Image (tube, rainbow, N blue to C red):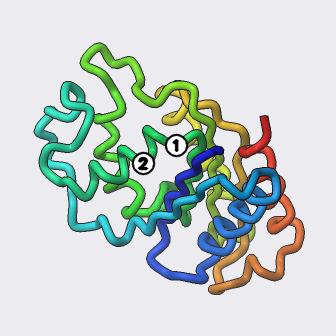
Amino acid sequence: MKKTVVLMASPRLQSNTDILANRVMDGIRSAGSEEDIIDKTDLVELQEFVCCACGQCRAAGECLQFPEVTEILEKIEEADNLVLATPTWWLGPSSYLKIFMDHWGAFLRPDYTSRIAGKRAAVVSCCGNAEINLADQVCSQLSELLSFLKVDVVGTLGVKGVAEIGAVSRDRSALEKAFQLGVALNSK
């Protein structure tokens, strides 16, 4: 049995990001077994829990300020796989993902070694810009962060030119790539 945590960082359900995340989840299911668990977390629900930089998380391995945040951090620690799904906002991930990632100090021990080393991850992002794939840049940034935590990034998918809500649902190539990313993540 494998466990996957999907962090959904768009404020809109059925957004392009949500559609891609769901397609990755379809791929995960196709490559897994009936016992596998996929836990999709809507990060909008955690937006009020802003890190106060108390610095206690590295020693404690949890957020001592917000139990709601610790609950999600623990799910990630217990999971085999992680999916980050975010829209591209001003050359970066959405504020919802960033607010949650600010709590990732809990994934570092006091000596800065990773508590989540060895996990596998996939990153998906989309952007409205049809000329420049800014989503690829976001995927690269997030991959670098995950690599710092010694998480194996199996693959990324940045999709450009999807400004209209639901536009990615007409992009067969992107949907297939998202599905195959899920398959790759849950294989092995």
Mark 1: secondary structure = loop
What amino acid type is highlighted by mark number 2? Lys
Residue at far front of view = 35
User: Is 54 positioned to the left or the right of 139 in the image?
Assistant: left
Picture layout, residue 54 above or below residue 158: above
Q: Nearer the viewer, residue 176 or 126?
A: 176
Q: Nearer the viewer, residue 8 or 186?
A: 186
Q: Look at mark 1 in the image and give the residue it sits on.
A: 79
User: Is 179 positioned to the left or the right of 19 in the image?
Assistant: right
Tell me which corner region of the image, top left, top right, bottom left or bottom right, holds residue 180: bottom right
Residue 98's disc is none
Residue 108 visible in image? yes
Q: For the residue carrying disc 1, how many other residues have a C-alpha within 10 Å: few (<14), some (14-19), or many (20+)?
A: some
Q: Are marks 1 and 2 in contact (CB under 8 Å)?
A: yes
Residue at far top of view = 111
Residue 16 in percent (x, y) is at: 64, 75
Residue 132 visible in image? no
- Which residue: 40% across, 27% down? 115
Residue 75 in percent (x, y) is at: 42, 48
Residue 24 in percent (x, y) is at: 71, 60
User: Is 56 positioned to the left or the right of 179 in the image?
Assistant: left
- Which residue: 37% across, 62% down? 95
What amino acid type is highlighted by mark number 1? Ala
Picture layout, residue 64 above or below residue 97: above
Q: Look at mark 2 in the image and give the residue it sits on.
A: 75
Cα distance in 3D space between marks 1 and 2: 6 Å
Picture layout, residue 106 above or below residue 14: above
Residue 166 in percent (x, y) is at: 68, 84
Q: Give the position of the C terminus as an image quadrant.
A: top right
- Which residue: 72% across, 58% down? 34
Picture layout, residue 71 above or below residue 12: above
